[in-house]
Structures are given as structure tokens and as C-alpha cells.
């Protein structure tokens, strides 16, 4: 196995950092979206459902391109961020946004599965005991959704480690700055003599994925015991 | 407590039309499944919205479609005990009990944790999780949780249906104790006539989404005697048991009744006796195998379905027997007739209802 240089180590660290940041940032939004889709009664619910799930079926490159327009100098979000002095495109923050958008439907789905398994009587009981909708959300639905939140986070984190298409468009492939594991593999695979390094990074990917899945199993088993 | 309902609610082909006034501290809502009982609970508590109409509790509108009033369930101060305990699995028994109390405005708090725990005997459960409690313990905690939210009105929606007979009567005594102790008005919803009679004196009968009667529980029970496969259930409070010649002899209303020796003898308790298990004789039968032969006087007669009910005065007690109308004619039974009632010793069945102050048998955890 070839020895990793600082560029490879930073790619591994960056992958972990981007995935983790994307997961943490998405969690409250994912919870809110899952709640609205599970319990909300409002116009435009179907539209929200489609919007949330769209990244699941859209090519990541399309998402990346749309984000590029949105975050670019002429996009409304890009302009706002630029005026605040926060450049986003071609930084690791852009990679976080791309990863979050692509993984979002997976996270929402996992949270919804957990949320919809909550006995509706518990929600009714909490309302009849004097809890308003927000109170009920925070004291009954949230704690009983923990399992779904964990599953959704793990899924998103694992998916994030593999994010490629959207990331390369909005964050580029700058070694040491925005180059994550998949981007580094792409670099090595397309350069002569890069195969051993590409394979080594593949191995790292596999190890990370297996570790995440084992962690998920472990957490699931612990929670079952707590029940 | 005064609850006024004038509501309409449509579900596909089924419609629930209510127009009633409930007054007093306790009222039963009786009806078969599908009669609209649970919908009534949802409408009153605000978990479901009527299509139109109004709901007033003690003069305050909870819902009024004309005035666009719909008080959300969390502001109605109406406690609910469901068929299933529906305890919060992520909270301890204490956490469950306090959930409603914490959300109750200080000026409405009159029941505190300590007195509730005493009445419902919850002390040993307080710090346990709710997932390893037995069915009866869970329902006791659910009752406590609803009561501790200091509601203006407690709705009990078939709170005993998920429990076995033995636990049912224990929980009834707890329900009665807690409502009496804290002067808590309640509506008791059930499809069981027996539960109804043990819980309330006033009752509203529902069928097919309409009110069919608003009367006393006793009257409704007599009316249903001829329709029910078990007839009318006489409830007898027996005391002072002594063993005599292989049988248990209990005191009842100035007389004595002979019952077979049971597996678990108690000094007394509540027993049930079906109107079908009483045989009437015009004259004293000389030889008879039934262990109980009581001299009695006919107080009144009533019709129920194809049967005639005979209300009998026995000592200071009352019993209802049922006969076919032809028998009433043949024996010339009229109010004032002197008769003999024969009852087999084995016809009595003990209801495992604990009396206040009597210790409750422990039941092991389930699940």
C-alpha cells in the first residue's frame, strides 16, 4: 500500500468534516420537514413532498449546477452571502451545502418512518394534558423520534462520504481545500500511475462505510435495549 | 358540571347528531361499538371538530361554528383516560404524572401529586419506567396523569375494556375513589352495562349516532333485561362470611345467603346474580335442591322485550327476577303478592372489586 501524503490525509479529513457538518446542519431542517410531511395539514404539502424528494431522483450534477447558479455571483443567495463577506463557491462550505441537499431526502425519509410509528394516542394525550402543538412537538414527538433521527443522520453521513457530482461543480476539486475522498480517487484514477493510490483511497472509503454501518447497528441495538 | 352539546358530524354514511344537556357530577354514555361514543369524546375534548353546532361547558363555549369558536384541546382543561393507557414511554411514572400538572395554570391547581399518589396507591411505582408495569398499573398511572392535570371534566373512554375482569373491578374502585375524593365531574363511556351501573347513576344511551335515552342506569338496565343474554344483573353486597357444612354463608340485607365454598374466601364483597337464576314459587316448595329459599314480596312488575321483570323485596334488599309473561298470569303475580325465590348456591359470582381501604392483591408485571 502506498504511503499517504498530506494531500490524501486532508482529503480523508475533509470528507469526514463535510459529511459531519452537512448532517448536523440538516438535522433541524430534516426534523421539521419530516414533521410537516407527517402531521402537517396545509396547502402545498404535496409540493413540499416532491421538493424534498427531488434530489433522490435528480442527477447530482443537475443539483450541483442549480446550486452553482443559486450560489453564484448573480444568484440571489450568492449575492446575499457575498455582501455579508462570506464567499461560498469553491470552498468547503459549498461542499457541505451540496452534500446536505443530496442527502436530505434520505434523512427526511428515515425520520418520517420513525415519526409515523408514534402512537397517535400519545400525541392526543399530550394535547389533552395541556400541551400546545409546539410543546407536544418538543416533549413527545422529538424524544420519540430519536431512533429515526439517528438512522437519518447515519444515512446522510454515509451518503455524504460518497458525494461527488454536485460537489465537484460547486466546490471544485482543489487538493487540500475542497478535495474529498471521491474527488481524490477521481484525480488518481484519471492520471497515469495513480492506480495504487486510487485503490488505497477506495479501501479507506470501504473501511469508513463499514465503520458507519457497524456504528448504526450498535446504536440500534442499544436503543432497543433501552425500550 | 353542565355540558351542552348540539353538534353534527358526518363520516361518509355515518352521522353523529347530538342534542343533549348533561348535568351533575357523573354521567355514563352507553352504547354498542359504532354508536358514536368515542366520537363524542373526541368532539368534547377538541381532538375532533364537529361539522357544525356548539359545545358549552358550564356556560363557556368550547366550540361554536356560528361564532367561529374552536378552543384547542390543550386549553379546554378536559382530561381523558383512553382504553389503552397511552403512557409516554420516554418518561418515568413520575414524569407521566407530572406532564399535565406542569402545564396547568397555578390558579387551577387543586389536586397535587402527593394526595393523588395516596388515593391511587402509586407510591411504589413513582420512579419506575412505564414499560415494565402491568396492565392494571399502567391504567392506574394513566388515570392519575389525567386527574393530576386538574381538568374541569374527566372523560373516560372505555377505560376498562383492555383489562381482564379481575383488574377491571380494581380499577373501578380506583376511579370512583379518585373522582369522589377530588370532586371531579366525569363522563364514563362504556358498552358494558355492569361497568355503567358500578360507575354512574345517570346515563345517556347512544345508538347509530343518535341519543336513544337519557335516564337512570337502573332504569336502562331493567329496560335491557329482555334483550341481554345475561338478563338483569343483581348486585349484592355480602358481608360477614362464616363456613357452615362445606358452604359459605354470607349476611345480606337482614337475611342470609348460602354460596359454595370458593377457592379464595373473603369476608365479603360485591357479588352478581342474574335475573335468570332466580326461580319463583307461589307456595313454599317442600323439597328443593337450591340452597337459598327466600320469602319475598312483589314490589313491581315491568316489561322488557319478551320477558317480565319482577322486582322483589327480600328483607331490606331488592332483587329482580325475570319470568315469561304467561307465568306471571298463571301464578297471578301482582304487586303485593307473597312469593318464594329459589337461588342455587352456585349462581352467585364474586366481582373482584376491592373496597376502599381494602388492600389490593398484587398482580405481576406483563410483557
Image (cartoon, coloured by chain):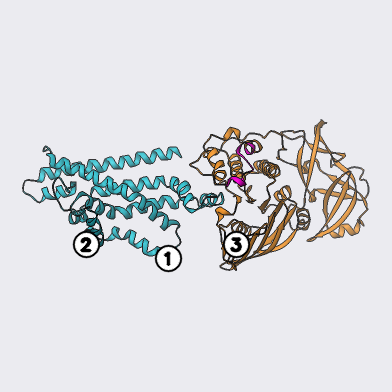
Are the numbered discs 2 and 3 placed on the same chain, yes or no? no
Mark 2 to mark 1 CA distance (whole Å): 28 Å
Q: Which chain does tag 2 point to?
A: A
Q: Which residues are magenta?
A: B104-116
Location of mark 1 (residue): A43
Report which quarter residue B305 is drawn in: bottom right
| Label 1 neighbour load within 10 Å: few <14, some 14-19, many 20+ | few
Mark 3 to mark 1 CA distance (whole Å): 24 Å
Tell me the shade of chain B.
orange
Left or right side of A17 for B109 = right
Q: Which chain does tag 1 point to?
A: A
Tell me the shade of chain A.
cyan
Tag 2–tag 1 contact (CB < 8 Å) = no
Are the numbered discs 3 and 1 placed on the same chain, yes or no? no
Tag 2–tag 3 contact (CB < 8 Å) = no
Question: Which x, y percent locates residue A64?
Answer: 22, 58
Left or right side of B122 for A179 = left
Location of mark 3 (residue): B63
Q: Is residue B367 visible?
A: no
Helix, strand or loop at mark 3: strand
Question: Which x, y percent locates residue B174?
Answer: 67, 41
Amino acid at each position: 500500500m502506498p504511503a499517504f501524503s498530506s494531500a490524501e490525509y486532508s482529503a480523508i479529513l475533509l470528507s469526514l468534516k463535510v459529511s459531519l457538518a452537512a448532517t448536523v446542519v440538516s438535522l433541524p431542517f430534516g426534523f421539521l420537514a419530516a414533521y410537516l410531511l407527517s402531521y402537517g395539514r396545509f396547502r402545498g404539502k404535496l409540493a413540499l413532498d416532491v421538493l424534498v424528494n427531488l434530489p433522490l431522483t435528480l442527477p447530482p450534477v443537475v443539483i450541483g449546477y442549480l446550486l452553482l447558479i443559486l450560489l453564484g455571483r448573480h444568484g440571489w443567495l450568492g449575492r446575499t452571502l457575498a455582501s455579508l463577506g462570506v464567499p461560498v463557491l469553491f470552498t468547503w462550505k459549498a461542499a457541505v451545502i451540496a452534500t446536505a441537499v443530496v442527502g436530505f431526502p434520505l434523512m427526511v425519509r428515515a425520520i418520517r418512518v420513525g415519526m409515523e410509528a408514534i402512537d397517535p394516542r400519545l400525541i392526543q394525550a399530550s394535547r389533552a394534558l395541556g400541551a400546545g402543538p409546539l410543546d407536544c412537538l418538543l416533549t413527545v414527538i422529538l424524544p420519540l423520534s430519536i431512533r429515526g433521527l439517528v438512522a437519518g443522520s447515519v444515512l446522510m453521513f454515509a451518503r455524504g462520504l460518497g458525494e461527488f457530482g454536485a460537489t465537484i461543480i460547486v466546490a471544485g476539486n482543489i487538493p487540500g481545500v475542497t478535495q474529498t475522498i471521491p474527488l481524490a480517487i477521481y484525480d488518481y484514477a484519471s492520471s497515469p500511475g495513480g492506480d495504487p493510490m486510487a485503490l488505497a483511497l477506495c479501501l479507506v472509503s470501504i473501511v469508513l462505510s463499514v465503520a458507519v454501518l457497524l456504528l448504526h447497528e450498535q446504536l440500534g441495538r442499544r436503543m432497543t435495549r433501552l425500550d | 358540571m353542565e355540558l351542552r352539546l348540539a353538534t353534527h358530524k358526518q363520516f361518509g354514511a355515518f352521522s353523529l347528531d347530538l342534542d343533549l344537556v348533561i348535568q351533575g357530577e357523573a354521567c355514563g354514555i352507553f352504547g354498542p361499538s359504532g354508536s358514536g361514543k368515542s366520537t363524542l369524546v373526541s368532539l368534547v375534548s377538541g381532538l375532533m371538530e364537529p361539522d357544525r353546532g356548539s359545545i358549552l361547558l358550564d356556560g363557556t363555549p368550547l366550540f361554536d361554528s356560528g361564532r367561529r369558536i374552536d378552543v384547542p384541546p390543550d386549553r379546554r382543561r378536559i382530561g381523558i383516560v383512553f382504553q389503552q393507557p397511552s403512557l409516554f414511554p420516554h418518561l418515568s411514572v413520575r414524569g407521566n404524572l407530572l406532564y399535565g400538572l406542569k402545564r396547568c395554570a397555578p390558579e387551577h391547581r387543586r389536586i397535587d401529586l402527593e394526595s393523588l399518589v395516596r388515593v391511587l396507591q402509586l407510591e411504589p411505582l413513582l420512579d419506575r419506567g412505564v414499560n415494565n408495569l402491568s396492565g392494571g398499573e399502567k391504567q392506574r398511572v394513566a388515570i392519575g396523569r389525567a386527574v393530576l392535570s386538574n381538568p374541569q371534566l374527566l372523560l373516560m373512554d372505555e377505560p376498562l375494556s383492555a383489562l381482564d375482569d379481575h383488574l377491571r373491578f380494581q380499577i373501578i374502585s380506583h376511579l370512583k375513589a379518585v373522582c369522589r375524593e377530588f370532586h371531579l365531574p366525569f363522563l364514563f363511556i362504556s358498552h358494558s352495562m355492569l361497568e355503567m351501573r358500578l360507575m354512574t347513576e345517570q346515563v345517556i344511551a347512544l345508538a347509530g349516532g343518535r341519543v336513544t335515552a337519557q335516564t337512570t342506569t337502573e332504569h336502562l338496565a331493567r329496560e335491557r333485561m329482555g334483550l341481554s343474554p345475561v338478563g338483569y344483573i343483581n348486585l349484592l353486597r355480602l358481608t360477614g362470611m362464616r363456613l357452615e357444612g362445606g358452604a359459605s354463608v354470607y349476611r345480606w340485607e337482614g337475611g342470609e345467603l348460602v354460596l359454595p365454598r370458593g377457592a379464595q374466601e373473603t369476608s365479603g364483597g360485591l357479588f352478581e346474580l342474574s335475573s335468570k337464576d332466580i326461580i319463583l314459587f307461589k307456595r313454599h316448595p317442600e323439597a328443593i335442591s337450591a340452597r337459598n329459599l327466600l320469602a319475598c314480596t312483589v314490589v313491581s312488575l315491568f316489561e322488557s322485550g319478551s320477558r317480565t321483570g319482577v322486582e322483589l323485596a327480600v328483607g331490606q334488599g331488592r332483587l329482580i327476577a325475570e319470568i315469561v309473561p304467561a307465568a306471571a298470569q298463571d301464578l297471578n303475580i301482582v304487586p303485593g303478592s307473597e312469593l318464594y325465590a329459589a337461588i342455587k348456591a352456585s349462581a352467585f359470582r364474586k366481582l373482584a372489586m376491592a373496597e376502599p381501604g381494602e388492600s389490593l392483591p398484587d398482580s405481576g408485571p406483563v410483557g
